[in-house]
Image (spheres, rainbow, N blue to C red):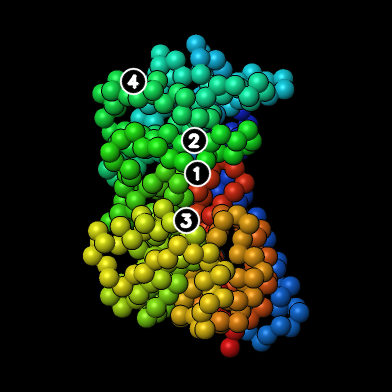
Amino acid sequence: MHCEHFIQKRCSSCHHCMTDYAEQVERKDQQLKIQFSSWAHLDTDKGNDNESSSITWLKPVASADSAFRNKAKMVVSGAAHQPILGLPATQGKEALSLVDCPLYPKPMQEILIYLQDWIRRAGIPPYNVAKKKGELKFLLLTQAQKPEQYMLRFVLRSTQALPRIENNLAELQARFPNIQVISANIQPVHMARLEGDEEIFLTEKQSITETFNDVPLVIRPKSFFQTNPQVAEQLYATAREWVREIKPNHMWDLFCGVGGFALHCASPDTSVTGIEIEPEAIASAQYSANQMGLTNLSFAALDSAQYSQGQEQAPQVVLVNPPRRGLGKALTDRLEALAPPYIIYSSCNPDTMKEDIQGMSHYRLERMKWFDMFPHTDHVEAMGLLVRKS
């Protein structure tokens, strides 16, 4: 990927972008195999069981090397007469506009370029961290590609700048009618926190819909959503394929978010219970289930570990997709006790994934596949199939 910001040493977020992409994929593949295969070998040496600890590695899913990201999180800095969307000033470096970042598709770049000037014309003062003055802290733009729609969020220190936004919305919506959802999030705390609790919608519509594999997924302001849609589509399709091989009557989807895995894996023969702590995400998942006419899905806004503690038995398959910190000991211990025959583990952090699997000694990691959700970085999305040892 060609990036002038990286070449000129203004931004180093994509620290492998000058490496040939095929070489990046090969490096990640080898590193992940070493990380997990060496552990599997050690597990065999310890004599924990008589079953083979070898892992079947499936072909990784590569990404486009540019224009693959569907969400822009821009720090707003500079001054009211010259706002800058991108990276704030740091010691020795000036603030950097990233509205033309090659990670974003051209239509997103066009909106971001326009917004940077629109903020100036609207007279919305950027927040100054050092002086604790100003109003606009962040700008968050999310794209759904099927169909092409956008959600735009202004993260503000207070409601003081709301009239300036509202007075200039007609111009913005006339220029980009596919920006279907616009909201203001109020984050009054002076700290490195992306968003606050209060969301004020400035449009009648409050969500956009992305479609993966003919499954509609609702994106709302505070819902987690994968940032690389082409790769995410294949992640969900792979999970569905694995579940259909097992053919469970019932399964859990823990940390289900907006229901990406649950909605893909549900079938006339497989019912799914989805658990997610964020009520907004659960509302989105239930809406999608209703749209698809699925009646064998149930969703609940609960903590996954607490939910598991209240269950006397587990279904045949438990799918988990935790945040970067992993499952944690309480949940791994509970899964060990509940003893589902299969666990499908999807993770954006192979380090915590490996720790969690090591904490479940009654399971062997049978199959692994990884997805390059984050090109030009060291990060991957990995998915493994764990089988209960006989």
Q: Is residue 9 left or right of residue 203?
A: right
- Count residues near mark 3 (Cα–Cα under 10 Å), then give few for <14, some for 14-19, many for 20+: some
Distance from the alpha carbon under mark 3 to that under mark 2: 18 Å
- Can the viewer see residue 341 in this picture? no
**Is the Cβ of the residue at disc 1 closer than 8 Å to that at disc 2?**
yes
Circle 3 sits in a helix, a strand or a loop, which is it? loop
Q: Is residue 151 left or right of residue 256?
A: left
Q: Which residue is mark 3?
A: 278
Indicate the amino acid at tag 4. Answer: Asn
Residue 305 location in percent, x, y?
A: 57, 69
Quadrant of res 190? top right
Q: Which residue is mark 1?
A: 197
**Is the Cβ of the residue at disc 3 closer than 8 Å to that at disc 2?**
no
Indicate the amino acid at tag 1. Answer: Asp
Distance from the alpha carbon under mark 4 to that under mark 1: 24 Å
Residue 192 location in percent, x, y?
A: 63, 37
- Count residues near mark 1 (Cα–Cα under 10 Å), then give few for <14, some for 14-19, many for 20+: few
Q: Which residue is mark 2?
A: 186
Residue positioned 33% across, 45% down in the render: 207
Earlier sequence position, callout 3 versus callout 2:
2
- Can the viewer see residue 270 in this picture? yes
Circle 1 sits in a helix, a strand or a loop, which is it? loop
Instruction: Name the quarter where the C terminus is drawn.
Output: bottom right
Earlier sequence position, callout 1 versus callout 2:
2
Quadrant of res 264? bottom left
> Which label sits in the foreground, 1 or 3?
1
Q: Which residue is mark 4?
A: 167
Indicate the amino acid at tag 3. Answer: Glu
Indicate the amino acid at tag 2. Answer: Ile
